[in-house]
């Protein structure tokens, strides 16, 4: 088994199952051209987020970590006409690229893009009465995962689905002695989620265009 094979299989999945999508391709190209890191979800993963949102009939979605808006396009496209995606991004440059990509996708009206540290924006969302969200996608700085889970719960209702990206990290998350802040953040998320009676949780390992990683899937009870 090799990363090349995983990537080739991902290409096959996308080619056979996902409609050709110039808007998404342009969003990735614009992100690359602007020098953004190539860490968006893969197309197959983005489609999974889109399908999850539609499966639960999500009308209000929160995303933590926008980057160039690639996953945001998948999520916002799942919304009904009166739906809203609130997406949080710390880097103004990333937010600028995302805003342009979302505009090209015709989604500006459905997306509320907030620039700043998510940990500062989340209490503001609560104060504004923005919750509860139907779906929360956590995909920003991994050391803050425990804080983001806390806020996802505050902004949720029974039935809210929370998805957290990058919880396997090529298996590095197994290392209880790790000093990597990303690994520590993920392990704390697992400890909190596993011990919280308000949550039903699993994590699924993935391979594909982005190598070996995985996502956690949580349901608020
Ligand atoms: N969800 C995106 C990828 C997000 S990458 C996609 O799949 O297309 C992670 C993003 O989180 C980066 O753009 C990074 O700038 C942002 N980020 C990092 N720390 C943050 C913070 N404290 N608050 C908000 N965003 C943050
Ligand atoms: C990184 C962040 C991500 O959200 C991701 O999906 C992959 C990598 C990173 O910070 O390296
Ligand atoms: Mg990610």
Image (cartoon, grey):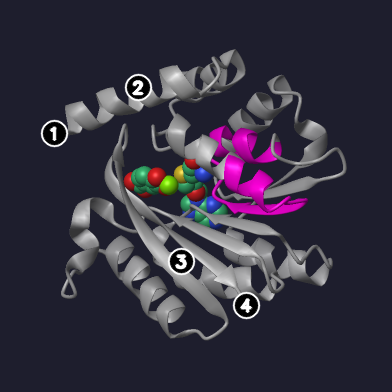
Write the start and end of the magenta stretch as one range: 51-76
Q: Nearer the viewer, residue 107 or 114?
A: 107
User: Which quadrant of the structure image shows residue 215?
Assistant: bottom left
- The picture places residue 115, in percent across and down from the top left corner, at 66, 48
Q: How far is disc 4 from disc 3 in space, using C-alphas?
A: 23 Å
- The picture places residue 185, in percent across and down from the top left corner, at 36, 68
Q: How far is disc 1 from disc 4 in space, using C-alphas?
A: 39 Å
User: Disc 4 marks which residue?
Assistant: 221
First in sequence: mark 1 vs mark 4: 1
First in sequence: mark 3 vs mark 1: 1
Q: How many C-alpha atoms fall within 10 Å of the one at disc 2: few (<14), some, or many (≥20)?
A: some
User: Disc 2 marks which residue?
Assistant: 11
105 is higher (above) or lower (below) than 48: above
Decide whether residue 213 is among the magenta residues: no
Residue at image coords 72%, 47% = 85
Q: How far is disc 3 from disc 1 in space, using C-alphas?
A: 31 Å
Quadrant housing the N terminus = top left
User: Disc 3 marks which residue?
Assistant: 144
User: Disc 1 marks which residue?
Assistant: 2
Q: Secondary structure at mark 2?
A: helix
User: Which quadrant of the structure image shows residue 131?
Assistant: bottom right
First in sequence: mark 2 vs mark 4: 2
């Amino acid at each position: 088994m090799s990363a090349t094979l995983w990537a080739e299989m991902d290409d096959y999945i996308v080619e056979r199952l996902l409609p050709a999508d110039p808007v998404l391709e342009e969003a990735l190209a614009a992100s690359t051209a602007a020098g953004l890191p190539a860490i968006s979800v893969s197309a197959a993963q983005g489609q999974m987020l889109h399908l999850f949102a539609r499966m639960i009939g999500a009308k209000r979605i929160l995303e933590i970590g926008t980057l160039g808006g690639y996953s945001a396009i998948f999520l916002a496209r799942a919304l009904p006409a009166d739906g809203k995606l609130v997406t949080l991004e710390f880097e103004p440059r990333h937010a600028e690229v995302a805003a342009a990509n979302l505009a090209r996708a015709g989604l500006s009206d459905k997306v509320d893009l907030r620039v700043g540290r998510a940990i500062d924006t989340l209490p503001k969302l609560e104060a504004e009465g923005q919750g509860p969200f139907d779906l929360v996608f956590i995909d920003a700085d991994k050391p803050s995962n425990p804080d983001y889970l806390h806020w996802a719960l505050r902004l949720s209702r029974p039935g809210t689905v929370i998805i957290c990206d990058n919880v396997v990290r090529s298996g590095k998350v197994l290392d209880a002695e790790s000093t990597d802040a990303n690994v520590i953040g993920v392990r704390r998320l697992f400890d909190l989620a596993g011990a919280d009676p308000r949550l039903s949780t699993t994590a699924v390992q993935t391979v594909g265009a982005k190598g070996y990683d995985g996502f956690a899937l949580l349901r608020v009870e």
